[in-house]
Image (cartoon, rainbow, N blue to C red):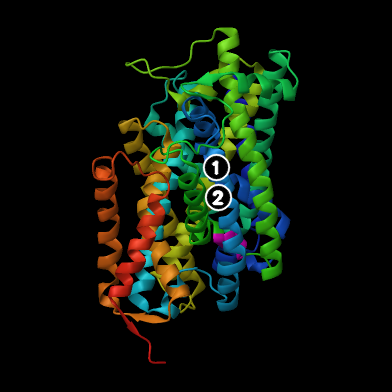
Amino acid sequence: MSIGLIASVLIVYFFLLILIAKITSKGADTDTFFTAGKGSPWYLVAFGMIGASLSGVTFISVPGTVQTEGMAYFQVVLGYVLGYLVIANVLMPIYYKMNVISIYEYLKSRFGTVSYKTGAIFFILSRTLGSAMRLYLATLVLQLFLFDAIGIPYWLTAFITVALIWVYTIKGGIKTIVFTDTFQTFFLVSSLIVTVVVIANKLDLSFFSLYDQITEMTTGKHSLSKIFFFDDYQSKLFFPKQFFGGMFIAIAMTGLDQDLMQKNLTCKTLKDAKKNMYTFTIILVFVNFLFLLLGGALYLYAQKQGVELPINESGKVLTDKVFPTLALNEFGTIAGIFFLLGITASSYASADSALAALTTGFCIDFLGFKERQDEKQKSKLKLFTHLGFSLIFLCIILITYQIKAEALIGVILKIASYTYGPLLGLFAFGILSKRKLKEIYTPFVCVIIPFLCFWIDKNSITWFSGYQFSYELLILNGLLTYLGLYFISVRDKN
């Protein structure tokens, strides 16, 4: 693909994004930025949430992991289904009943201000780190295949990437994002389907014969298409670890996360929000399976065509670079264009909603926007908050670039195991118990427990006869937080 073609595609893409933002933000105020006037069509929210949930990390990393893990990630996806059912039938009824803007207002109602602020801080920490690292992948692809060739340094690529998000989200906020995410999810899913079809055609295979040949390929001890792992309970791929870990990741990273729940809360009614969640779940399972199928197809193509995969100094395959390398160098112009649109769409769909959610959370939870009446003052504070989080994103992206982190899907979910654990424990304690907290101790419990889990994780192989934690570390974190909160609680006499 030529540099001119890549640049032209991206310019048109962002022009359309900004055009959508301009149309949808007409007459918007701060309340529109936060709630979209409670008028979002549920089907648009459901489809748009696919892009926000998957992100560029899924787009790049999940296909790459097939080389070492087969399709084990689908065990996590099946766990998501159970988690989303809990969200739809337990958490969303609470949020709609309380008519919250920030979901952490529940903690204020249940426990008090200290717990409320603690939960809000952990969301800001979790979402800022996770979303910035997701956006890093998009900047990396743009740098490798466009900006390097025209002599633009990486820091400027990162700056332009973040600035574009700021431009099209600053006025309309969540109202704009419901529409831009729908637009971007379309390109994400289209890119996935087009690439699988192109690979099958290049190998002269039908869809089913493509899958059959992937099944015949092996990596280590198992087939590339292997999904279920029951044979070794110590392995990170052991089914119960992946399934129940996936369930609680869904609950924590969707149901207890202001970013994705803010979209759900823009639906008119709880009934619409539930329809949105059920539809979203069905589509998400199908799309994730296609990502894993794509991963197998990439390695099958490389083997059949004798293509050298990108490796590091020690000869290890750089799995996060396999898809971009093949898509832009091997599959032709159409597949290359759709890949660029897909990675851009997935990364921006995740980052733009995160930026709006972080701005919403900080304005509601820490700047007291519900009590403020002056619209000019609120608009000014919102502007500076939005700008501040944009700059934080930029800093994290630049730091991640210096670290050269690999296989980001594992890194991000590992971080989530630590940072979302306290949120899981706080909400579980609020919903499942009737006790009151001695709030002065809440932040100490929520900070100490993740460090304790980190210590346990680092020593698990020695202490537990070779046992390795996977995504179930989040469950342990939430459980220990729950127990810690119990010890600082008292019976509620009322």
Relative to residue 46, is residue 65 drawn left or right? left
Between residues 169 and 318, which one lies in front from this camera angle? 318
Three-letter code, disc 1 = Gln
Q: Is residue 346 above or below residue 444?
A: above
Q: Indicate the quadrant where residue 412 lies.
A: top left
- Give the spatial CA distance, label 1 vs label 2: 6 Å
Residue named by callout 1: 75
Three-letter code, disc 2 = Gly
Q: Residues within 10 Å of mark 2 (few under 14, many from 20)?
A: many
Which residue corresponds to the image point at 67% horizontal and 47% vertical from the top-left?
A: 182
1 and 2 marks in contact (CB < 8 Å): yes
Can you say which quadrant of the picture contains the N terminus? top right
Q: How many marks?
A: 2
Q: Residues within 10 Å of mark 1 (few under 14, many from 20)?
A: many
Q: Examine the structure image and report whether residue 444 is included in the region drawn in magenta.
A: no
Is residue 180 visible in the rendered image? The answer is: no
Q: Indicate the quadrant where residue 349 lies.
A: top right
Relative to residue 114, is residue 319 drawn left or right? right
Between residues 436 and 221, which one lies in front from this camera angle? 221
Which residue corresponds to the image point at 68% horizontal and 49% vertical from the top-left?
A: 282
The picture places residue 17, in percent across and down from the top left corner, at: 63, 43
The picture places residue 217, in percent across and down from the top left corner, at: 57, 18
Q: Which residues are magenta?
A: 261-265
Residue named by callout 2: 79
